[in-house]
Amino acid sequence: MKTAFLLLSFLLISACQQQEASQHSFSEATFIKRSIPHLHRDVPTKLILTKYETLKPNEWGERITGVQTHFETSEKEIALTFDACGGLHGSNVDRELIRFLQEKQVPSTLFINSRWIEENTKLFQQLATDPLFQIENHGTHHQPLSVNGKSAWGISGTASVKEVIAEVKENQEKIEKLTGSKSTLFRSGTAYYDEVAVQIAKDLGIQIVNYTILGDAGATFTSAQVKNALMTAKPGDIALLHMNQPKSGTSEGVKQAIPILQEKGFTFVQLHNQNLQ
């Protein structure tokens, strides 16, 4: 079971991270560090820096202290979440999937990366005006969230408290500027964290949200595998899928699964106002 879980965790990041390791060369890492804003001008940020700059994390992973993976409900409700990762191999659009969700009126939560927004700004703004879609934060540079540079699947994480804040806040501010609404949920690139970074996000008023259902394994699943994954749904589950890989099996698998889940009495909800656990 442990081996199978590790394999699925590896597949999760494939859609977002194919070729990403090579992209994060020394020059890009240097750029990321140099691009951090002058956070010391922000008094709350100064307090966070003072609070956390000497703390060393003990946990690392997808399901650690403070990470929300499901929600409490007494109804047959589940949440579909779709990541849009951005970058060289992650800025595509699964338009068929989006059309299907709109045609069938399926509420969903979209975790969107800053780089994807830059490549698809007009579409992003259209999605943000559609009440079917809750827009949330998938990070600025799509990095694992760490205070000491810990890596996940070959991708270097944020390396300090300042970088954690920048990874979360820069994209949050971009989303707010374009939509008028401030995102309060965050999922990192690779969905990996340490517990100090998670607590920093909490102090910024942000909840970290991962998943209970690995819906498409980083958009590497076939349509049949996506369907089968969603068929395991239980009330309160959060499914992680992708909306940036149109050649994957995600769209067709979702199209097959949703009618069956509806026949079983399930309804689909967004994550806002849910009692996340």
Image (tube, rainbow, N blue to C red):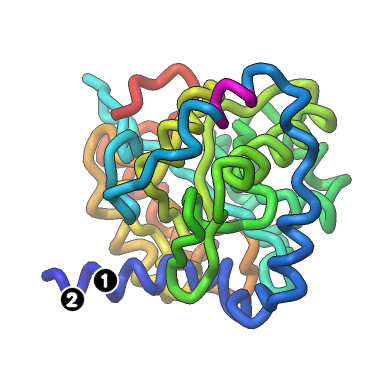
Give the class, few, some or many, for how many residues have Cα within 10 Å of label 2's Cα (few <14, many ≥20): few
Residue at the spot 36% in from the left edge and 62% down from the top edge: 227
In the displayed structure, would residue 168 be above or below residue 247? above
Q: Nearer the viewer, residue 123 or 174?
A: 174
In the displayed structure, would residue 64 be above or below residue 174? below
User: Residue tagged by mark 2?
Assistant: 3
Residue 46: in magenta span: yes
In the displayed structure, would residue 11 be above or below residue 275? below
Across and down, in percent, residue 51 comes to: 47, 27
Q: Inspect the image, locate mark 2, and give the three-letter code of the amino acid beneath it.
A: Thr
Q: Nearer the viewer, residue 93 or 187?
A: 187
User: Residue tagged by mark 1?
Assistant: 6
* Image quadrant assignment for residue 132: top right
Residue farthest toward the right in the current orientation of the protein: 122
Q: Secondary structure at mark 2?
A: helix
Residue at the spot 23% in from the left edge and 53% down from the top edge: 232
Mark 1 and mark 2 in contact? Answer it, CB < 8 Å: yes
Residue 131: in magenta span: no
Across and down, in percent, residue 107 comes to: 53, 34
Residue at the spot 41% in from the left edge and 50% down from the top edge: 193
Residue at the spot 68% in from the left edge and 17% down from the top edge: 43
* Residue 260 visible in the shown view: yes
Q: Which mark is residue 73?
A: none
Q: Which residues are magenta?
A: 45-49
